Image (tube, rainbow, N blue to C red):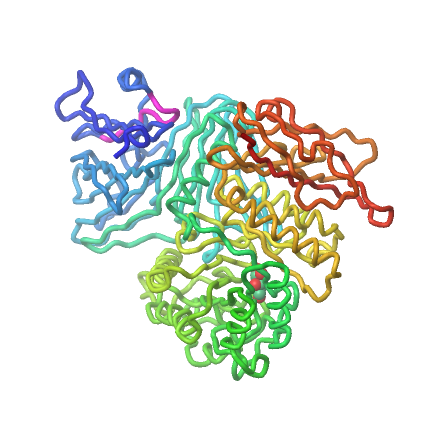
């Protein structure tokens, strides 16, 4: 293994007893130091910038030691990551180190600190994994019950990290449906800062399971020591940062244990989801780049494969699906240079038709009244035009008005003995994914579709309801508190089975918009729908926040109609295109309602996006000017790995006459390279002053370019929006 890229070493520290062991887990730019002396509790000594070998010893002898994984019972006064009830009612646990092992699991190096309780046969294994070529270390825990009776887990977090107090700020995302991914940045104050989710099925509409900690004051996008933490889990989570009376903030993150006591039989192992940690001294954008690189390389499905440019039918026709309409959309997107057409909701149903959101979920047979040629006719229409075909499903759900529910009323999440509360359309229900029969059914939904239509290239997998009533008709009475966890295990199993059989399929995670943006589900999905809100101005804010933790390649971003269907705001097409082009570009519009001039602009944008796609989808993100700073402009850029190419985005976020907007300095370029500037999607009558000119990377990073506040348009086309996309190419 290349030592420069990855070094994992176990070194025996000088001066410690033979059973003493210092674990030094390093990535190219970070180190994590744990002391794991046999017979003692493991201690976390350090996490941060990579330590020189000479400093490791100094850290070991001077660092303030914290428990590597605080456990309840013999440490009752501080927050703990694990708390259990033994079969005899005893609530104390004190796992002590028995050994340290180093393995390669799926090709990734894993260091495990094995522990066993001082008295009870309960084992706790604390794992650390590195990802070669990235600065991410993830940690998780396995609890093994060796007791004769049941061990109950009341709290079972994935990991703990002490962070030295000072002026530490937390960045996290909040929001709600149609307003996901809002960025919040606040200083940590005494008390507990809790970020959590209780949806049951999806977990990122409101808060997000990822945070950043800026260690040296107010977050800066380009500078300053910053820690990132992402809980890789699709279900209910809880992230606590406890600022107690000590010199430290205490970060504990894991599954939300509320209403989820977990009962373990003898011999059973409970494995927590991983908590991914990263560190950068290049500020919040630096941490984002770490997560993005790691995500593309190791987590996201097909993170190394360019995404197709698509048209999705939803905002264009909603439930009004019919064969001529779909074929026309296929024609339109193909004629604009698109590569994929996705038929959204409304294509299925037998006894009950899917004409609105209140019927037929679960009845996944094509509605031949709408589509006489079925899906094959559409796949072949797409094929004839040289593009691919995709389809929408929502397989974890049903409606009370459906043949599925009539046949299997016991398959839904529902408290035994009660009528379930319904969701969307007044009739929607969540299927009980803890039930293996339901899991088989969901796998079969995809399997049948793919067997009948092997030409399907893309699935939009939606989930429009959370768990609103607690109860499983499958789980026994003494396992009802397992519902949230077993539901997600069921979903993950289903995803694994589908991925094993259909490894090449592109699958989008949609959940009423951005409800499933998390690193727990993304290994099974290629991308997620950022939000049901496609308003370009609001997207500037939502995509900014979402980009903190997720790469552009995963962020589906579509050009939609004006006025926008969610905000009713009228934004010029140029601005809508420029915003969509900063993510995975797509369209969500009825092309028949567009003028030829508009179609032409889209055609040109699609052609240009194909040229810059590798930089946007695989490049490094530098956020330059935050829309949240209220300075009237937002700006970001992507830079290719070799720094030969970059794409710069500039969006005006408000319009006042004679307002003074900041001149935005670029970042991430090679100071010694010379870059030629080309504006993309130009609508102005005259080119920019910098068009076609060359500038050194140093100049662009020291000064930026002067961007005009308005567009030079004919009078009747003038409007209150302005945006620019500039391509930078290194010249030799
Ligand atoms: C919610 C999704 O977020 C939308 O994009 C669309 O697919 C609808 N569901 C369809 O019902």
Residue farthest along the right direction in this orientation: 715
Locate residue 6, reporting x and y percent: 30, 32
Q: Quadrant of ligand 1?
A: bottom right
Please tell me which residue lies in front, 598 or 36. 598
Task: Read off the magenta span.
Answer: 41-51
Examine the residues drawn in magenta and state their main secondary structure.
strand
Residue at image coords 27%, 27%? 24
Evaluate whether residue 288 shows in this view: yes
Please tell me which residue lies in front, 688 or 207. 688
Magenta span contains residue 654:
no
Locate residue 197, reporting x and y percent: 48, 49
| Left-right relation of 304 to 37 | right
The picture quadrant where one finds residue 529 is bottom right
Please tell me which residue lies in front, 320 or 474. 320
Quadrant position of the N terminus in the picture: top left
The picture quadrant where one finds residue 673 is top right
Residue at image coords 64%, 65%? 332
Residue at image coords 72%, 52%? 573
Please tell me which residue lies in front, 545 or 623. 623
Residue at image coords 64%, 46%? 579
Evaluate whether residue 189 shows in this view: no
Quadrant position of the C terminus in the picture: top right
């Amino acid at each position: 293994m290349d030592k420069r890229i990855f070094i994992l070493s176990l070194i025996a520290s000088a001066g410690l007893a033979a059973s003493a062991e210092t674990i030094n887990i390093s990535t190219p730019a970070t180190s994590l130091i744990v002391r794991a002396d046999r017979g003692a509790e493991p201690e976390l000594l350090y996490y941060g910038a990579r330590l020189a070998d000479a400093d490791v010893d100094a850290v070991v002898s001077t660092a303030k030691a914290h428990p590597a994984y605080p456990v309840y019972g013999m440490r009752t006064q501080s927050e703990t990551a694990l708390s259990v009830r033994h079969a005899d009612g005893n609530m104390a646990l004190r796992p002590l180190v028995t050994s340290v092992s180093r393995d390669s699991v799926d090709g990734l190096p894993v260091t495990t600190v094995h522990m066993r309780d001082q008295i009870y046969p309960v084992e706790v294994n604390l794992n650390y994994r590195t990802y070669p070529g990235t600065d991410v270390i993830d940690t998780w825990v396995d609890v093994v019950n060796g007791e004769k009776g049941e061990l109950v887990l009341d709290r079972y977090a994935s990991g703990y990290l002490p962070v030295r107090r000072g002026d530490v700020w937390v960045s996290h995302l909040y929001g709600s449906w149609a307003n996901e991914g809002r960025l919040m940045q606040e200083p940590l104050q005494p008390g507990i800062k809790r970020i959590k989710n209780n949806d049951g099925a999806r977990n990122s509409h409101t808060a997000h399971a990822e945070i950043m900690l800026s260690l040296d004051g107010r977050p800066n996008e380009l500078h300053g020591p910053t820690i990132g933490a992402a809980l890789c889990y699709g279900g209910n989570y809880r992230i606590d940062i406890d600022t107690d009376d000590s010199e430290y903030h205490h970060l504990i993150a894991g599954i939300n244990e509320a209403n989820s006591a977990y009962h373990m039989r003898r011999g059973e192992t409970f494995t927590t989801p991983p908590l991914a940690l990263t560190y950068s001294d290049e500020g919040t954008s630096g941490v984002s780049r770490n997560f993005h690189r790691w995500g593309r390389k190791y987590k996201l499905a097909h993170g190394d494969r360019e995404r197709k440019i698509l048209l999705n039918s939803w905002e264009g026709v909603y439930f009004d699906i019919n064969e001529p309409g779909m074929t026309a959309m296929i024609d339109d997107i193909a004629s604009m240079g698109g590569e994929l057409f996705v038929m959204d909701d409304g294509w299925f149903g037998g006894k009950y038709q899917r004409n609105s959101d209140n019927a037929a979920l679960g009845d996944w047979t094509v509605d031949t009244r709408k589509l006489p040629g079925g899906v094959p006719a559409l796949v072949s229409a797409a094929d004839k035009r040289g593009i691919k075909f995709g389809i929408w499903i929502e397989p974890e759900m049903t409606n009370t008005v459906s043949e599925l529910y009539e046949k299997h009323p016991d398959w839904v999440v529902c408290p035994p003995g009660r009528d379930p509360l319904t969701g969307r359309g007044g009739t929607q229900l969540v299927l009980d994914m803890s039930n293996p029969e339901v899991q088989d059914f969901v796998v079969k939904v995809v399997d049948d579709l793919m067997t009948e239509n092997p030409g399907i290239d893309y699935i939009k997998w939606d989930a429009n309801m959370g768990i609103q009533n607690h109860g499983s008709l499958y789980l026994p009475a003494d396992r009802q508190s397992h519902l949230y966890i077993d539901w997600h295990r069921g979903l993950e199993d289903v995803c694994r089975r589908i991925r094993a059989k259909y490894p090449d399929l592109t699958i989008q995670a949609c959940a009423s918009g951005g409800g499933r943006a998390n690193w727990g589900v993304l290994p099974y999905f290629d991308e997620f729908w950022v939000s049901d809100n496609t308003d370009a101005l609001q997207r500037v804010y939502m995509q900014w926040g979402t980009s903190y933790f997720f790469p552009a390649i995963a962020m589906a971003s579509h050009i939609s109609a004006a006025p926008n269907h969610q905000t009713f705001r009228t934004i010029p097409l140029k601005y809508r295109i420029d915003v969509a082009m900063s993510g995975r570009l797509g369209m969500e519009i009825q092309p028949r309602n567009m003028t030829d001039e508009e179609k032409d602009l889209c055609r040109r944008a699609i052609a240009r996006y194909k040229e810059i796609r590798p930089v946007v989808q695989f490049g490094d993100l530098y956020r330059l000017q935050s829309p949240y700073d209220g300075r009237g402009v937002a700006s970001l850029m992507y830079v290719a790995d070799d720094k030969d190419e970059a794409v710069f985005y500039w969006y005006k976020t408000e319009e006042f006459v004679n307002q003074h907007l900041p001149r935005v300095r670029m970042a991430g370029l090679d100071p010694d390279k010379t870059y030629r500037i080309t504006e993309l999607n130009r609508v102005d009558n005259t080119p920019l002053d910098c068009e076609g000119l060359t500038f050194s990377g140093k100049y662009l990073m020291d000064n930026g370019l002067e961007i005009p506040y308005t567009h030079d348009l004919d009078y009747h086309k003038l409007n209150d929006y302005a945006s620019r996309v500039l391509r930078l190419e290194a010249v030799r």
